[in-house]
Amino acid sequence: MCGILALIHNNNYNLSQKNFIKINNLLSNRGPDHQGCINFKISNQNIKIGHTRLSILDLSILANQPMKSLSGRFIISFNGEIYNHYDLRKQLDLKHQINWKTSSDTETLVNLFEFYEFEDAINLIQGMFSFVLFDKKDNKIFAVRDLAGEKPLYFSFSNNFFTFTSDLKTIIRLPNFIKEINEYALKKFLELNYVPSPVTIFKNIFKLPAANYIKINLNDFKHIKINNYTDVLSNKNMEIKKWWNIDLNKNKKIESKDDVKSKIHYLLNKSVKQQLISDVPLGAFLSGGIDSSLIVSLMQKNQNNTKTFTIGYEDKEYDESKYANIVAKHLSTDHSCYNFSKNEIIEYIKYLPQVFSEPFSDSSQLPTLLVSKIAKEKVKVVLTGDGGDELFGGYNRYVYANKFWPIFNFLNPKLRNNIVYALINLTPPLFYKTISNLLKLNINKFSLNKIKSKIKLIDNEFSYYKILTQEWNFNDNIINYDMEDDDFYEIKSIFRNNNYSFESKMMISDFLTYLPDDILCKVDRSSMFFGLESRAPFLNKDIIEFSRNIPTNFNFLNGQNKLILKDILYQYVPKKIIDRPKMGFGVPIGRLIKNELKDWTNDILSTSICNSHGFFNFETVKKIKNQHFNNLVNNQHKLWSLIQFNQWYQEYYKQ
């Protein structure tokens, strides 16, 4: 993986090559092995392309970027890996007998466009990627992102320039860029703990959504500042288009459960085998859960002595390392387990704004950062289990939906309201016992508390999904400005689709939102902070497309979930090792806020800092702090989101 930067500006914009190189160097954590920059003109537009390289395939200088195609027509700055690039080379060689200069996937990719139309070419590739491609013959620019959103791509349009980059911190360093907080993005951040695509925390910077590309014709191009994504879509100078869509129509023949298991097993093994290509040491993150254990099992099947990495924690409630150690021992991996302390967590909190560049408050960011650090000491690439939960039903909320919603939805509204108010008035232990017995489930207490606090808001499937995935309510009185409650149309349309069960609708919605903007963002930014490449075999296109047609009862039955993957994993690891409740990959952030981080929390959420931006209702901030400090309400996630915004604001906005 790498860092990319492209700047296209008119003659009125003054940025020297020296300063461009300095800004490009801000991406050096993503690519510490080489920095490359080139200049040229297309249709009276000044083009500057930058690249920072993390060398994975073909370590020679010939594979450095930016890279030109054979004829020189195309120039690319590319971040990612093309796993089937050797197959694509064979395909090209059958017709064109190319004299390849490297064994790099970048050379394969840039030359695909010599022989295929753009959209045809990107549909041929299997991999994770974001890249900017310049066509010097037709005076066009293409910017594209992979289908699941593994690799980031930000863009911005101003009066004298537009730019694409792997990290928005490069954009805010450009001369004449004006930083303006996007209030809608801040509201969504407080709800979700991340800023959802296509917006960012800044009004005039956007994320290209997964599986999308931008095409810009530079002939007669006019620069214009754009602050709203709707204006991006309506701009006549460019076209934004999806190059791949998740299939929402179940029109394929359903196979037997055994056939489905065999097909998933085959596809996942094929994907793992593809992703083992590397000219540098390679390993895997291992939590001991189903997804990472299955990936490591298949790695061991295809190679010996896989290096695996996990972290432990002194608080046993949050320590999953013992399970990872058991799996590693059973599979005979070369295992490294590092036990970290409270002090190390606290030490790495200060780096979070640098790692993520915009507010991000999924507290599992901290252990992800730490496991990336220890892995980089031995390898340069890791495989992960990301995507398994969204594709095969791994989250507890899917199980709750399977049990809770049919009962809740069956009741007429009046009776339902009476029951809701009766439940709300129960003491927490009695509420927990009543719901658990009713649904015959061992329900996570934090999820149950979230349901109890918001149960009055449930009136349909979509509102139920929202209470389990959102932190702050719109009526929580935390923000100091008025804004309509708005949800992305694409997600609402999924919940109106009758082809899928409620569980499947949640899984698809998570795949389109939570996966790219939380899970994949967290892993990409944390690993790349240390120059470590992460790969996700579950996010192979064939696996994603096949998973959409798996019947609900193949994954969920009698309060159990992820049954397909469990059955495959049992072929490698005994059931007694695997069958246990799902644990989150987190840290006791709530306890730290009350104790070791209490003074710092008061400082970062002080009147002066909150008033410096004016977005938060400080009375609400004080209220949730006091509730948490006095053990009245567990407000750890709400507090962490406010802390992360203020910490980011101090570092990025006020600098």
Image: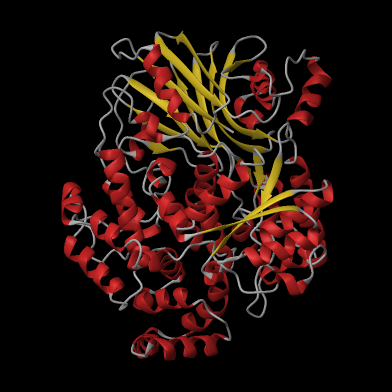
Q: Residue at x 49, y 57 (%)?
A: 364
326 left or right of 413? right
Q: Residue at x 46, y 52 (%)?
A: 490
Q: Residue at x 35, y 77 (%)?
A: 453
**Residue 74 placement (x, y as % from top left):** 59, 15
Among the 4 quarters of the image, the one containing residue 161 = top left
193 left or right of 582? left
| Quarter that holds the C terminus | top left
Q: Residue at x 42, y 85 (%)?
A: 412
Toward the viewer: 323 or 92? 323
Q: Is residue 457 above or below residue 33?
A: below
Toward the viewer: 574 or 388? 574
Among the 4 quarters of the image, the one containing residue 426 = bottom left
Toward the viewer: 65 or 350? 350
**Residue 61 placement (x, y as % from top left):** 65, 17
**Residue 151 placement (x, y as % from top left):** 54, 39
Query: Which color mode does the image show?
Result: secondary structure
Q: How many marks?
A: 0
Asked if residue 496 shows in the view, the reply is no
188 left or right of 396? left
| Quarter that holds the N terminus | top right
Among the 4 quarters of the image, the one containing residue 477 = bottom left
Toward the viewer: 382 or 564? 382
Q: Is residue 463 above or below residue 538?
A: below
528 left or right of 55? left
Asked if residue 541 shows in the view, the reply is yes
